[in-house]
Amino acid sequence: MTAEGHHFLKKYIVKDNSEQIISAYNKLIETDCKLILVNGGTGIAVRDVTIETLEPKFVKAIPGFGEYFRKISFDEIGIRALASGATAGITENDQLCYLLPGSTNACTTGLEQVILPDLNHLIKEITK
C-alpha cells in the first residue's frame, strides 16, 4: 500500500463478534480515511458474522468486487472459493470498504489483483 502512495491510519483486531466489529467500523468511518479493509468472518461458518454485520451499513454495494474476487480465487484454490462471501461497498462517509476472507493468501490476492489496481480511480469517483 505504501509503495502505491497510500498510508496506514488505524488497525483494530476484534473477535468474530458483531458488537466488536460494529464498534471498530464506527471508529473507522469517523476518520478521513478513504479505504477500510476488513479481513475475516466472510465464510459460511456459524462464527462468520462480518458480512451480516457490515453489509447493511453500506449505502452502495460494489457487487463486482465479490464476483471477480471469487473468480480469481477459483483459479487459485478451486471450488472452495465459492464459499467466500467477500464483498465491498461505500460507507455513509464516502469510504470504500472491502470485506475480505481471513486467509493471508486471500487478502494478498484481493489487495494486489483487485483493490490496488483500481483504488485511485475509485477514490476519485467517490470523492467527486
Image (cartoon, rainbow, N blue to C red):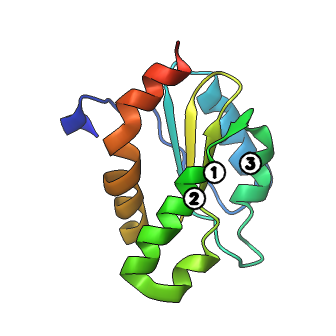
**Which secondary structure, mark 1?**
helix
Q: On screen, 40 above or below 79?
A: above
Which residue does the numbered mark 3 point to in the structure image?
Answer: 55
Label 1 to label 3: alpha-carbon separation? 11 Å
Q: Are marks 1 and 3 in contact (CB under 8 Å)?
A: no
- Amino acid type assigned to the residue bearing label 3 in the image: Glu
**Residue pictured at 19% horizontal, 37% vertical:** 3
* Residue at x-position 39% and y-position 29%: 121
Element marked by disc 2:
helix
- Residue in front for this viewpoint, 61 or 33: 61
Amino acid type, mark 2: Gly
Distance CA(mark 2)–CA(mark 3): 12 Å
Q: Residue at x 60, y 78 (%)?
A: 82
Which residue bears the numbered disc 1? 63
Extreme residue toward the top, this view: 128
* Residue type, label 1: Pro
Name the foreground residue: 113 vs 25.
Answer: 113
Q: Do the CB atoms of the residues marked 1 and 2 lie less than 8 Å apart? A: yes
Task: Answer with left or right where residue 38 lies relative to residue 15.
Answer: left
Q: Nearer the viewer, residue 94 or 7?
A: 94
- Mark 2 and mark 3 lie on one chain; the one further toward the N terminus is 3
Instruction: Residue lying at the far left in this picture: please name it.
Output: 3
The reply to whether residue 102 is visible in this rendering is no
User: Which numbered disc covers residue 66?
Assistant: 2
Q: CA distance from mark 1 to mark 2?
A: 6 Å
Instruction: Identify which residue, 36 or 125, lies in the foreground.
Output: 125
